[in-house]
Amino acid sequence: MAMRVLVVDDEEDYRLIIKDVLGGAGYDVRTAEHGEAGLEVAKEFSPEVILVDWMMPRMDGETFVQTLRRDASKRDIPIIMLTVKQTAEDELEALHFGVDDFIIKPFQAEDLLARLRALARRSGS
């Protein structure tokens, strides 16, 4: 069975590219355009991994992650933060508020796929 991945990003181009790359690699992918929509999709879709942009309107990635981590049924889902923020301090801040990995935009498809495989190994998926 294909691993279920939720992509939450306000940039439509990124959502479409990621969905195409992951879908082509055999993942079952759903998308949402902001954190509020992402929380709704997460309820219905039960993702095994979530990719979330840090800076989005309506609900940013940090608030999304913190909200998800308070939900007992969703708190253990691995989360990869996607962002244009590039400093070590930014990465440390993201790890502190609950993400499992951090990818700087723009990124290579191979990097994303490798990180998803690594998360799957660590989580036993």
Image (cartoon, rainbow, N blue to C red):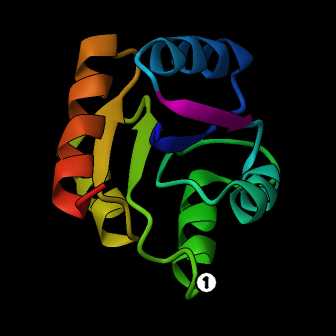
The image shows residue 37, relative to residue 14, as above or below, that is below
The residue that disc 1 covers is: 71
Q: Is residue 65 left or right of residue 36?
A: left
Q: Residues within 10 Å of mark 1 (few under 14, many from 20)?
A: few
Q: Position of residue 5 (x, y in %)?
A: 53, 41
| The C terminus - image quarter | bottom left
Q: Is residue 46 left or right of residue 100?
A: right
Q: Position of residue 33 (x, y in %)?
A: 77, 36
Which amino acid type is marked by label 1? Asp
Task: Provide the secondary structure element on which disc 1 rests.
Answer: loop
- The residue at 78%/44% (across/down) is 57
Q: Position of residue 105 (x, y in %)?
A: 40, 22
The image shows residue 1, relative to residue 91, as above or below, that is above
Q: Is there any visible trace of residue 108 in the rendered image?
A: no
- The residue at 76%/53% (across/down) is 41
Q: Quadrant of residue 106?
A: top left
- The residue at 81%/60% (across/down) is 40
Q: Quadrant of residue 116?
A: top left
Which segment is the magenta one? 27-31
Q: Is residue 41 left or right of residue 26?
A: right
- The chief SS type of the magenta part is strand
The image shows residue 44, relative to residue 74, as above or below, that is above
Q: Quadrant of residue 63?
A: bottom right
- The residue at 82%/51% (across/down) is 37
**Residue in the foreground of this view, choosing between 81 and 17:** 17
